Amino acid sequence: MLEIKNLHASIEDTPILKGINLSIPDGEVHSIMGPNGSGKSTLARVLAGEDVYEVTDGSVIYNGKDLLDMDPDERAREGLFMAFQYPVEIPGVSTKYFLRAAVNAVREHRDLTELDAYEFLKMVKEKAEILDLDTSLLDRSVNEGFSGGEKKRAEIFQMAMLDPGMCVLDETDSGLDIDALKVVSDGVNALRDGTRSFLVITHYQRLLNYIVPDRVHVLMDGRIVETGGRELAIRLEEHGYASIEAASA
Amino acid sequence: MPEDPNLALDNWAEQTDYKWGFVTDIESETLPPGLNEDTIRGISARKREPEWLLEWRLKAYRHWLTMEEPEWAHFPDHDWRPINYQDISYYSAPKSDDDRPKSLDEVDPKLLETYEKLGIPLEERAALAGVAVDAVFDSVSVATTYKGKLKEAGVIFCPMSEAVHDHPELVKQYLGHIVPPNDNYFAALNSAVFTDGSFVFIPKGVTCPMELSTYFRINALSTGQFERTLIIAEEGASVSYLEGCTAPMRDENQLHAAVVELIALDDANIKYSTIQNWYPGDENGVGGIYNFVTKRGLCEGDRSHISWTQVETGSAITWKYPSCILKGDDSIGEFYSVALTNMKQQADTGTKMIHLGKNTRSNIVSKGISAGNGQNTYRGLVKVRPKATNARNYTQCDSMLMGDRCGAHTFPYIEAENDTAVIEHEASTSKIGDDQIFYLNQRGITPEDAVSMIVNGFCREVLAELPMEFAVEAKKLLEVSLEGSVG
């Protein structure tokens, strides 16, 4: 359960989030939609704890714990995962090496035993099958020279490996063609298990054709201006954000 | 000088009116500070050296007097004070066991903590911390085991001072062959006052049966200040030598001026790896070692191969350019380097690849990491002489910056005198990205682990050149050296 209350955040003294209220119960998929510059990605990054953003007011409680009080790595170990809009390249560090370190950091936090190389590779194989991922990608440096589609698939694969309780997808559909979009969505859907929650951030409705949300929230100028079911997303596709802007003005 | 070394010693003491117990208290002797011909005679006599070597030293000293301390290195921030060479003591015998700590309980806990972090084997920690070795384990027997194995293969591996007596013809032939005593200011100084170092001889066709490293770590700890090393690989011979240690060395000597010479004959292969972690000084740049080293290899024979690998994380100032003279046709020279500067450390390091023979190839991979107020300079020369037809060089020179108070500088010099030469130079400078650290954090990895992962990735090609066990230690060393530089 993620509970965001009256969240305000700024970057270099410019307010971006101006009072977000949102609660995501376990097992639900919520989508945040909004025009460019509305604060969608800022919300994702504030939740993950990127320090260029300053939280000026409000609270975020995740599974009863104060998320804002934790460092980014602690949040991750507590079960918050963010799929990046632009996954970062780390030259010279193999994806497998990195991922094993990450998986074991999370496992240690959960009082699980460290995976040895054999157990880790077994897990890689299992999860790769579910997501239909070519594991040769994992021998390459983290995200280095990956195509746009490969990067996004690798993000979803990492998500599967780390077994988070709360997944934030930051415009995962951007830059994907329709085939890649379908592959990535299938991956996400495979991870929907009734307890894991998702916050799917997107500009376009089309992603929601594949990842069907329980709730849709429209974010404009740092506030949630409308909340509804899936039909809200469809309405947005037909009439554009301007229709809501006009209605809420 | 008379030939009998003991007599020589007595004579010297008389002649110089020496009053500080050099002769009487032989266990704890240290020459008083100062450098003149008598100092050199004293060192030579103490080491019972033959006349020719004393003359060689004196000649070097006389030449040194005519030279000027170099000032060309790029140390933008250093308040350079000239070194007072008369303040240095040029001979200090190893401490007797009575003066050493008796057990690890008497050793600075901070030092032990670092050994722990670096994963240095327990039995080696004591030796490194200067504990009287006999109290911990029998180093003599360890040494004997190694020696037996090497002897069987025909390999000579001994202290230089021993080689002077046991293998004078080899030492005489090769000492100063690659780095002549008048080569540069610090090489001249080293030639005049060197105390010890290693001598390695691998006979024709022999592959040295072990890495010359473990043995070295335990036995050659006190060769510090003016080291002199000579490695000769005959036709078809092969050897891998590792000097230094990841453990921080507590050393009171501020000036280090080592000379290393390598000679590879036809089809010989020498791999020389260094891990340097001398005391870097404190955060304000107070103290620390000045490390002024001359290292040079001669690929004398056809198809010979010399490879330098270095991980440099210590010393307040480092000047070091391990070089290869590619004289034999089809010979290969390589240089792989990681230099890390933190706090107020300054490193000016690189290599020289001198192509003389046909089809000679050289490969340079340099990784500089600057953190804190550190300044890191790559300085490299690739020179292709007129007869070096079809010479090839590839240079890759990458710098990584952490924070905004450090600096990275690159000075490549290229001189091609043969039209067929192909020389490539690639350089990059990157800042360790907050976005990279954040990305790894978001996967549950702590900021410290994130930085070491990124840095190790950056250095991967160089670390891959190290013998396995040392690669592991080198990775940890980079972590420890960067501790506290995040954020």
Image: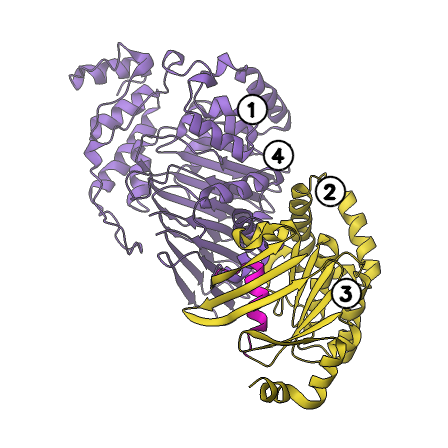
Chain colours: A yellow, B purple
Q: Is residue B469 left or right of residue A238?
A: left
Q: Work out whether residue B33 or residue B3 is closer to the camera in this orientation and state it.
A: B33
Q: CA distance from mark 3 to mark 1?
A: 49 Å
> Picture quarter containing residue B186?
top left
Q: Which chain letter goes with mark 2?
A: A
Q: Secondary structure at mark 1?
A: helix
| Mark 3 belongs to chain | A
Residue A45 sits inside the magenta stretch:
yes
- Read off the residue under disc 1: B122
Instruction: Write down the residue under mark 3.
Output: A188
- Same chain for the residues at labels 4 and 2, yes or no? no
Q: Nearer the viewer, residue B316 or B155?
A: B316
What is the span of residues highlighted in magenta in the rendered image?
A37-51
Q: Chain of mark 4?
A: B
Q: Amino acid at mark 1?
A: Leu
Image quadrant occupied by the N terminus of chain A? bottom right
Of badges 4 and 2, the one in the foreground is: 2
Residue A215 screen position, x and y as percent: 72, 71
Q: Is disc 1 in contact with disc 2, using a CB cutoff of under 8 Å?
A: no
Distance from the alpha carbon under mark 4 to that under mark 2: 38 Å
Mark 4, other Cα within 10 Å: few <14 / some 14–19 / many ≥20? many
Of the residues shown, which amino acid type is indicated by label 2?
Leu
Left or right side of B222 for A50 = right
**Chain holding disc 1:** B
Q: Which of the two marks, 1 or 2, is nearer to us in this view? A: 2
Give the residue at mark 2: A115
Residue that appears at 41% across and 50% down: B321
Point out the residue furthest to the left here: B17
